[in-house]
Amino acid sequence: MSRDTADPGSIAREPGSVTGDSAGATDTPSGDHAGDPRPATYYHLARAVLYREFLIFVRYPANAVGGIVVALFFFGVLFYGGQLLAGQALADSLEGIITGYFLWTLSVGAYSSVSNDIGSEVQWGTLERHITTPFGFAPVALLKGVAKVVRTFLTSAIVLAFMLILTGTRLSLDPITVISIAGLAIVSVLGLGFAAGGITVLYKRIGNWLNLLQFGFIVLISAPVFELPWTRVLPLAHGSALLQRAMVDGVRLWEFGLAELALLVGVAIGYLFGGYLVFHYATRRARRLGVLGDY
Protein backbone atom coordinates (compact mmCIF):
# COMPACT_ATOMS: atom_id res chain seq x y z
CA MET A 1 0.00 0.00 0.00
CA SER A 2 1.39 3.45 -0.88
CA ARG A 3 2.02 6.17 1.65
CA ASP A 4 -0.77 8.32 0.17
CA THR A 5 -3.43 5.63 0.67
CA ALA A 6 -2.19 4.15 3.93
CA ASP A 7 -4.34 4.06 7.04
CA PRO A 8 -3.65 7.31 8.95
CA GLY A 9 -3.32 5.36 12.19
CA SER A 10 -0.50 3.27 10.77
CA ILE A 11 1.64 6.11 9.44
CA ALA A 12 4.92 6.42 11.35
CA ARG A 13 5.25 9.77 13.02
CA GLU A 14 8.46 11.70 12.63
CA PRO A 15 10.27 12.55 15.87
CA GLY A 16 9.06 15.88 17.19
CA SER A 17 6.02 16.05 14.89
CA VAL A 18 2.73 17.35 16.31
CA THR A 19 -0.48 15.40 15.79
CA GLY A 20 -4.03 16.32 16.47
CA ASP A 21 -4.01 14.45 19.77
CA SER A 22 -0.93 16.22 21.01
CA ALA A 23 -1.32 19.65 19.46
CA GLY A 24 -2.09 21.22 22.77
CA ALA A 25 0.66 19.42 24.68
CA THR A 26 3.85 21.19 25.64
CA ASP A 27 7.23 19.90 26.75
CA THR A 28 6.44 16.43 25.46
CA PRO A 29 9.43 14.08 25.94
CA SER A 30 11.11 12.70 22.86
CA GLY A 31 9.72 9.44 21.49
CA ASP A 32 13.15 7.86 21.83
CA HIS A 33 13.16 8.24 25.63
CA ALA A 34 9.50 8.46 26.68
CA GLY A 35 9.16 4.72 27.19
CA ASP A 36 12.59 4.05 28.67
CA PRO A 37 12.38 2.28 32.05
CA ARG A 38 13.82 4.06 35.03
CA PRO A 39 17.04 2.53 36.37
CA ALA A 40 16.53 0.29 39.38
CA THR A 41 17.98 1.44 42.68
CA TYR A 42 18.95 -0.37 45.86
CA TYR A 43 15.59 0.69 47.26
CA HIS A 44 13.79 -1.24 44.52
CA LEU A 45 16.09 -4.21 45.09
CA ALA A 46 15.46 -4.22 48.85
CA ARG A 47 11.71 -3.89 48.34
CA ALA A 48 11.65 -6.76 45.83
CA VAL A 49 13.71 -9.05 48.07
CA LEU A 50 11.60 -8.30 51.15
CA TYR A 51 8.39 -8.81 49.18
CA ARG A 52 9.70 -12.12 47.82
CA GLU A 53 10.49 -13.32 51.34
CA PHE A 54 7.03 -12.28 52.50
CA LEU A 55 5.40 -14.22 49.65
CA ILE A 56 7.44 -17.33 50.47
CA PHE A 57 6.42 -17.05 54.12
CA VAL A 58 2.72 -16.60 53.26
CA ARG A 59 2.44 -19.15 50.45
CA TYR A 60 4.34 -21.89 52.25
CA PRO A 61 3.15 -21.60 55.85
CA ALA A 62 3.64 -25.31 56.53
CA ASN A 63 7.40 -24.89 56.11
CA ALA A 64 7.48 -21.91 58.49
CA VAL A 65 5.38 -23.74 61.08
CA GLY A 66 7.62 -26.79 60.67
CA GLY A 67 10.69 -24.71 61.51
CA ILE A 68 9.02 -23.46 64.69
CA VAL A 69 7.98 -26.99 65.69
CA VAL A 70 11.51 -28.33 65.13
CA ALA A 71 13.03 -25.52 67.22
CA LEU A 72 10.56 -26.16 70.03
CA PHE A 73 11.19 -29.91 69.85
CA PHE A 74 14.94 -29.47 70.33
CA PHE A 75 14.37 -27.05 73.19
CA GLY A 76 11.95 -29.50 74.80
CA VAL A 77 14.57 -32.24 74.60
CA LEU A 78 17.14 -29.85 76.09
CA PHE A 79 14.83 -28.68 78.87
CA TYR A 80 13.25 -31.94 80.00
CA GLY A 81 16.40 -33.96 79.44
CA GLY A 82 18.37 -31.40 81.43
CA GLN A 83 15.85 -31.57 84.25
CA LEU A 84 16.37 -35.31 84.53
CA LEU A 85 20.15 -35.01 84.48
CA ALA A 86 20.89 -31.74 86.26
CA GLY A 87 17.78 -30.99 88.30
CA GLN A 88 18.15 -27.75 90.29
CA ALA A 89 21.37 -26.82 88.53
CA LEU A 90 19.41 -26.42 85.30
CA ALA A 91 16.71 -24.36 87.00
CA ASP A 92 19.32 -21.93 88.32
CA SER A 93 20.68 -21.28 84.81
CA LEU A 94 17.43 -21.58 82.87
CA GLU A 95 17.22 -17.88 81.95
CA GLY A 96 20.66 -18.01 80.40
CA ILE A 97 19.84 -21.19 78.50
CA ILE A 98 16.68 -19.66 77.03
CA THR A 99 18.55 -16.50 76.01
CA GLY A 100 21.35 -18.51 74.44
CA TYR A 101 18.94 -20.76 72.57
CA PHE A 102 17.08 -17.72 71.26
CA LEU A 103 20.33 -16.25 69.92
CA TRP A 104 21.32 -19.62 68.46
CA THR A 105 18.10 -19.89 66.43
CA LEU A 106 18.73 -16.38 65.09
CA SER A 107 22.33 -17.23 64.23
CA VAL A 108 21.47 -20.43 62.39
CA GLY A 109 18.82 -18.59 60.36
CA ALA A 110 21.22 -15.78 59.42
CA TYR A 111 24.09 -18.11 58.54
CA SER A 112 22.08 -20.59 56.50
CA SER A 113 20.22 -17.84 54.65
CA VAL A 114 23.43 -16.61 53.00
CA SER A 115 25.45 -19.82 52.70
CA ASN A 116 22.53 -21.94 51.50
CA ASP A 117 21.40 -19.32 48.98
CA ILE A 118 24.87 -19.14 47.47
CA GLY A 119 25.11 -22.93 47.45
CA SER A 120 21.75 -23.19 45.70
CA GLU A 121 22.77 -20.67 43.04
CA VAL A 122 25.95 -22.68 42.43
CA GLN A 123 23.97 -25.93 42.16
CA TRP A 124 21.36 -24.45 39.83
CA GLY A 125 24.00 -22.82 37.63
CA THR A 126 22.51 -19.32 38.01
CA LEU A 127 25.32 -17.71 40.00
CA GLU A 128 26.85 -16.04 36.93
CA ARG A 129 23.56 -14.35 36.10
CA HIS A 130 23.52 -12.69 39.51
CA ILE A 131 27.16 -11.64 39.30
CA THR A 132 26.60 -9.91 35.95
CA THR A 133 23.68 -7.84 37.24
CA PRO A 134 24.22 -4.09 37.83
CA PHE A 135 24.02 -4.71 41.58
CA GLY A 136 26.37 -7.70 41.72
CA PHE A 137 25.66 -10.89 43.61
CA ALA A 138 26.99 -9.81 47.01
CA PRO A 139 24.38 -7.03 47.58
CA VAL A 140 21.61 -9.37 46.42
CA ALA A 141 22.80 -12.14 48.74
CA LEU A 142 23.20 -9.69 51.63
CA LEU A 143 19.70 -8.30 51.20
CA LYS A 144 18.32 -11.83 50.97
CA GLY A 145 20.10 -12.56 54.23
CA VAL A 146 18.66 -9.45 55.87
CA ALA A 147 15.17 -10.38 54.68
CA LYS A 148 15.53 -13.88 56.11
CA VAL A 149 16.89 -12.44 59.35
CA VAL A 150 13.72 -10.34 59.65
CA ARG A 151 11.64 -13.49 59.14
CA THR A 152 13.85 -15.41 61.57
CA PHE A 153 13.31 -12.70 64.19
CA LEU A 154 9.56 -13.24 63.89
CA THR A 155 9.74 -17.03 64.14
CA SER A 156 12.35 -16.91 66.93
CA ALA A 157 10.13 -14.51 68.86
CA ILE A 158 7.33 -17.08 68.66
CA VAL A 159 9.73 -19.80 69.83
CA LEU A 160 10.86 -17.54 72.69
CA ALA A 161 7.27 -16.94 73.78
CA PHE A 162 6.57 -20.68 73.86
CA MET A 163 9.79 -21.31 75.79
CA LEU A 164 8.82 -18.76 78.43
CA ILE A 165 5.33 -20.24 78.75
CA LEU A 166 6.66 -23.80 78.84
CA THR A 167 9.20 -23.11 81.58
CA GLY A 168 7.32 -20.41 83.49
CA THR A 169 10.37 -18.13 83.21
CA ARG A 170 10.28 -14.34 83.05
CA LEU A 171 12.83 -12.30 81.11
CA SER A 172 13.31 -8.59 80.44
CA LEU A 173 12.23 -8.06 76.84
CA ASP A 174 12.83 -4.42 75.97
CA PRO A 175 12.31 -4.45 72.16
CA ILE A 176 14.88 -1.77 71.32
CA THR A 177 17.59 -3.39 73.44
CA VAL A 178 16.95 -6.98 72.35
CA ILE A 179 16.62 -6.21 68.63
CA SER A 180 19.66 -3.91 68.58
CA ILE A 181 22.03 -6.25 70.43
CA ALA A 182 20.81 -9.47 68.81
CA GLY A 183 20.80 -7.85 65.37
CA LEU A 184 24.38 -6.62 65.68
CA ALA A 185 25.46 -9.97 67.12
CA ILE A 186 24.21 -11.93 64.11
CA VAL A 187 25.68 -9.50 61.57
CA SER A 188 29.00 -11.23 62.21
CA VAL A 189 27.28 -14.52 61.35
CA LEU A 190 26.24 -13.05 58.00
CA GLY A 191 29.95 -12.52 57.36
CA LEU A 192 30.61 -16.18 58.14
CA GLY A 193 27.82 -17.07 55.72
CA PHE A 194 29.51 -15.06 52.97
CA ALA A 195 32.82 -16.80 53.64
CA ALA A 196 31.11 -20.21 53.59
CA GLY A 197 29.36 -19.30 50.35
CA GLY A 198 32.67 -18.33 48.77
CA ILE A 199 34.16 -21.68 49.71
CA THR A 200 31.09 -23.36 48.19
CA VAL A 201 31.70 -21.54 44.90
CA LEU A 202 35.17 -23.08 44.74
CA TYR A 203 34.60 -26.57 46.11
CA LYS A 204 30.88 -27.08 45.36
CA ARG A 205 29.48 -29.87 47.58
CA ILE A 206 30.73 -29.18 51.11
CA GLY A 207 27.34 -28.83 52.77
CA ASN A 208 28.13 -31.26 55.58
CA TRP A 209 31.14 -29.21 56.66
CA LEU A 210 29.20 -25.96 56.47
CA ASN A 211 26.33 -27.37 58.53
CA LEU A 212 28.83 -28.47 61.17
CA LEU A 213 29.66 -24.82 61.81
CA GLN A 214 26.10 -24.25 63.05
CA PHE A 215 26.87 -26.33 66.13
CA GLY A 216 30.04 -24.31 66.60
CA PHE A 217 27.77 -21.33 67.29
CA ILE A 218 26.86 -23.00 70.58
CA VAL A 219 30.50 -22.79 71.68
CA LEU A 220 30.71 -19.14 70.63
CA ILE A 221 27.48 -18.19 72.40
CA SER A 222 28.62 -19.86 75.63
CA ALA A 223 32.19 -18.50 75.45
CA PRO A 224 33.52 -17.37 78.89
CA VAL A 225 34.07 -13.73 77.98
CA PHE A 226 34.64 -12.67 81.60
CA GLU A 227 37.28 -15.30 82.34
CA LEU A 228 38.84 -15.03 78.84
CA PRO A 229 38.41 -11.42 77.65
CA TRP A 230 40.05 -12.13 74.27
CA THR A 231 37.02 -14.23 73.29
CA ARG A 232 35.00 -11.02 72.99
CA VAL A 233 36.43 -10.52 69.49
CA LEU A 234 34.95 -13.83 68.33
CA PRO A 235 31.62 -13.73 66.49
CA LEU A 236 28.56 -13.98 68.76
CA ALA A 237 30.61 -14.16 71.99
CA HIS A 238 30.44 -10.49 73.03
CA GLY A 239 26.91 -10.08 71.68
CA SER A 240 25.77 -13.12 73.65
CA ALA A 241 27.23 -11.69 76.87
CA LEU A 242 25.46 -8.36 76.34
CA LEU A 243 22.19 -10.08 75.44
CA GLN A 244 22.38 -12.16 78.62
CA ARG A 245 22.74 -9.00 80.69
CA ALA A 246 19.90 -7.34 78.81
CA MET A 247 17.37 -10.19 79.01
CA VAL A 248 18.35 -11.73 82.35
CA ASP A 249 19.52 -8.71 84.36
CA GLY A 250 17.28 -6.11 82.68
CA VAL A 251 20.09 -3.81 81.49
CA ARG A 252 18.85 -1.37 78.83
CA LEU A 253 20.75 -0.43 75.69
CA TRP A 254 21.70 3.04 76.90
CA GLU A 255 22.98 1.62 80.19
CA PHE A 256 25.80 -0.29 78.53
CA GLY A 257 29.22 1.29 78.35
CA LEU A 258 30.23 3.07 75.16
CA ALA A 259 33.27 0.83 74.79
CA GLU A 260 31.09 -2.31 75.01
CA LEU A 261 28.74 -1.08 72.30
CA ALA A 262 31.63 0.08 70.13
CA LEU A 263 33.21 -3.37 70.37
CA LEU A 264 29.90 -4.98 69.41
CA VAL A 265 29.61 -2.77 66.32
CA GLY A 266 33.27 -3.25 65.42
CA VAL A 267 33.08 -7.04 65.62
CA ALA A 268 29.92 -7.05 63.49
CA ILE A 269 31.40 -4.84 60.76
CA GLY A 270 34.77 -6.59 60.87
CA TYR A 271 33.41 -10.09 60.30
CA LEU A 272 30.91 -8.91 57.69
CA PHE A 273 33.66 -7.14 55.74
CA GLY A 274 36.04 -10.07 56.17
CA GLY A 275 33.43 -12.54 54.96
CA TYR A 276 32.71 -10.39 51.93
CA LEU A 277 36.43 -10.28 51.08
CA VAL A 278 36.61 -14.08 51.26
CA PHE A 279 33.57 -14.37 49.01
CA HIS A 280 34.98 -11.82 46.54
CA TYR A 281 38.36 -13.56 46.40
CA ALA A 282 36.75 -16.99 46.01
CA THR A 283 34.54 -15.88 43.11
CA ARG A 284 37.50 -14.24 41.36
CA ARG A 285 39.56 -17.39 41.76
CA ALA A 286 36.65 -19.49 40.48
CA ARG A 287 36.53 -17.28 37.39
CA ARG A 288 40.24 -17.72 36.76
CA LEU A 289 39.91 -21.49 37.15
CA GLY A 290 36.83 -21.54 34.93
CA VAL A 291 34.64 -23.27 37.52
CA LEU A 292 32.28 -20.43 38.42
CA GLY A 293 29.42 -21.79 36.33
CA ASP A 294 30.35 -25.48 36.57
CA TYR A 295 28.83 -27.96 38.97
Image (spheres, grey):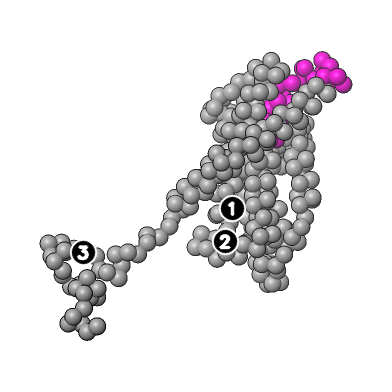
Q: Is residue 134 left or right of residue 141?
A: left
Q: Is residue 97 visible?
A: yes
The residue carrying mark 1 is 141
Q: Is residue 48 left or right of residue 127?
A: left
Mark closest to the chain's N terminus, 1 or 2: 2
Residue at image position (58%, 33%) is: 154
- Is the stretch drawn in magenta largely helix, strand or loop? helix
Is the residue 2 above or below the residue 244 in the image? below
Picture mark count: 3
Mark closest to the chain's N terminus, 3 or 2: 3
Q: Amino acid at mark 3?
A: Thr
For mark 2, give the secondary structure: helix
Q: Quadrant of the C terminus?
A: bottom right
The residue carrying mark 3 is 28
Q: Which stretch did the figure color magenta?
A: 83-105
Checking the image for residue 124, the label placed there is none
Q: Nearer the viewer, mark 3 or mark 1?
A: 3
Residue 109 spot, x, y in % from top left: 66, 41
For mark 1, give the secondary structure: helix
Q: Amino acid at mark 1?
A: Ala
Q: Quadrant of the N terminus?
A: bottom left
Is the residue 182 above or below the residue 80 in the image? below
Residue 7 spot, x, y in % from top left: 21, 74
Is the residue 149 above or below the residue 23 in the image? above
